[in-house]
Amino acid sequence: MKKALLYFMTALLIVFMAGCSAKGAEETEAVEQSTKAEVVQNQTESEKPEESEYAVDDIAEPRQEIKIIYTNDIHSYIYNTITDQDNNVTPGLRLSNIAAMKNDFKAAGDNVLLVDAGDSIQGTIYGSMDEGRTIIGLMNDTGYDLSAVGNHDFDYGVIELQRCTEEAEFPFISCNFRSAETGETVYPGTHIFDFNGTKVAFIGISTPDSMVTSAPVYFQNEKGEFIFSFDGNGDVNRLYKTVQENIDSVRNEADYVIALGHLGIGEGETKRGISSTAVIQNTEGLDAFIDGHSHSIVDGQKIKDKAGKEVLLTQTGSNLQSVGLMTISSNGDITTELLTGYDGADEKTAKTENETADYIDSYMGKTIAVLGSPMYVSNPRNHDQRLIRAMEMNSGDFVTDAVYWYFNEHMNQECDIVLANGGGIRAPLEKGDISIKIIKDVLPFENQICLIKATGRQIVDALEMGATVVGEWDEQWDAPAENGGFMHVAGMKYTIDPEIPSAVKTDSEGEFVSVDGEYRVKDVMVYNRQTGEYEPIDLDGEYTVGGINYFLRNSGNGLVMFADDDMVTDYVGQDANIQAEYIKSFDMKNGLPYISTETSPLSKYAGYELDYENPYGAGRITIK
């Protein structure tokens, strides 16, 4: 018995020792594999290509495939519709579709992100009704993971933007928007996502033009001193340096580095070197660039960086024209495609969209007038060719006439001239029923109207600054080059000679300094309501000028020539509401005001240039 027991105990000991030996072998092998991985990684670090120190590192473990859904310049177009040839209206691409897309990818086990490249909260009444908070709530429901900061995200003021971003369940990033006092960025410059060891870093970039294209006063204290700044405003090399520093800060941590920028590739951005292409060409280490701002359709363009490496550039257009889908494969290839629709909609997001639309329709969707002819912002024969920022359009006449009528007829307050920047007129008006909701799509910024006293020289300088790119051609859009400060007018007319080179000088902030040469703007004439004649402007004379306080009071579009002028009256009312009052003053047909040249209250002004039926306006602006 004792002998048998001894044999049994010996057998157990042998089994136990064998198990320990196997376990030890496994642990030793794991340590060796770990050490081997570290050695491979260290070797890779030391064997980067000589031509660039920013090549993506080889890693021991296989990378994860990652899908990145992206949008840009949504501009609060949350309730898009499509009208077919038979006038049947169906839903267009909406955030609820994008939410469903992300949910479907996640359900399939995919690694997925949803990001936005800026300008999401402003553009329509859906954004302006509560300074963007409804849009942020919808983006939360949609499942956004990250957003850049766009220039129009500042249009309710920096404080309101910060309130919105605090309510967001996702971070906002911008590497070049800073506190002027501390020099620190207001938002983080970068954000890194980790998918089981595969890391994707994003760098946020805001256009340096934000301080000009949004009202400068938003970036100033009560003394008029700038308390915020943008790297690249005045010194483009500062922008490149900042972006490069942020690339360097994440390059060794991340497998992929992607710029999430609101820079654009428009004519103005390109000429000044602040475009997304210029940033790519003057930096190294990016793998892709998701862009915004210029509302371009870029379905994957390869741009060589400073070291000669190709970087993928993409942009989805605007107003949810399309949604982008970028795929980073497990072998490191990056591809992208733009989708104009998606089957399926997330119920929660769709419910919020519908409730918001119902609220707006009940409040502002009632018909207040009938429009006899369309009001255009684009070429009537090619709607992709926007012209409102390059030449006279009947919508520009209509908007300026509303303010001209409001001061002179409604308020009995003498107004000689009205100016309106083309960049503030955002949508056309279709023939037929008009509601306040539709008007607010045309004028979504809720700008206040004011009346100032200005000299003839200041007025001509403002026209000249608006005409800087007239005569140039934008190859990307196959259209005349745009300037958001192009001036539409009421109570005056003028000519532009594009054969004369622009002599406008601006400072480092993009603000007007002088005209150092011959003026392109000629034959400026002011309408005399007493005589019914247009008379040459007196450069030394004083005129009352109406318009939005965005530029007449707050120097928007860099129009600082009016900054110190005497204010006759301010905060008269929001531009869209004044437009509605003008509409209600037209002669009635079938119980509603009917909008046409003949029925306008300004038609009684003898000799006044008025033609709403002509898409290109009444001839107030002549381009030689």
Image (spheres, helix red, strand yellow):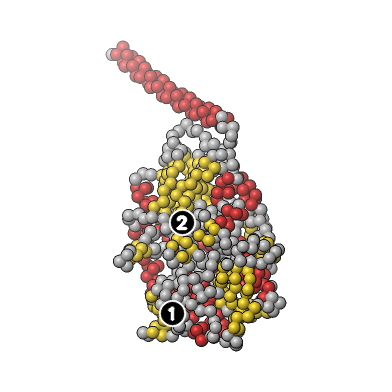
Q: Which residue is mark 2?
A: 317
**Image point (33%, 14%), residue name:** 6
* Residue type indicated by callout 1: Ile
**Image point (58%, 75%), residue name:** 493
In the rendered view, does 224 fall on the left or right side of 387? right
* Residue type indicated by callout 2: Gly
* Residue at disc 1, secondary structure: strand
Identify the residue at the far left of this view.
1
Which residue is more in the foreground, 280 or 256?
280
Q: Identify the image quadrant of residue 365.
A: bottom left
Q: Which mark is residue 30?
A: none
x, y (%) of residue 542?
Answer: 68, 79
Q: Which is closer to the viewer, label 2 or label 1?
A: 1
Q: Identify the image quadrant of residue 448.
A: bottom right
Which residue is more in the foreground, 329 or 14?
329
x, y (%) of residue 165?
Answer: 52, 59
**Image point (34%, 59%), residue name:** 347
**Image point (39%, 59%), residue name:** 94
Q: Where, quadrant-wise, is the N terminus in this rendering?
A: top left
Question: Around disc 2, counting alpha carbons within 10 Å, would you say few (fewer than 14), some (14 to 19), or many (20 or more)?
Answer: many
Mark-to-mark CA distance, 2 and 1: 32 Å
Question: Around disc 1, counting alpha carbons within 10 Å, would you say few (fewer than 14), some (14 to 19), or many (20 or more)?
Answer: many
In the rendered view, does 364 fall on the left or right side of 458? left
Q: How many numbered badges does the structure rendering display?
A: 2
x, y (%) of residue 314?
Answer: 48, 49
* Residue at disc 2, secondary structure: loop
258 shown above or below 213: above
x, y (%) of residue 54?
Answer: 56, 38
Q: Identify the image quadrant of residue 21.
A: top left
Q: Which mark is residue 595?
A: 1
Q: Where, quadrant-wise, is the C terminus in this rendering?
A: bottom right
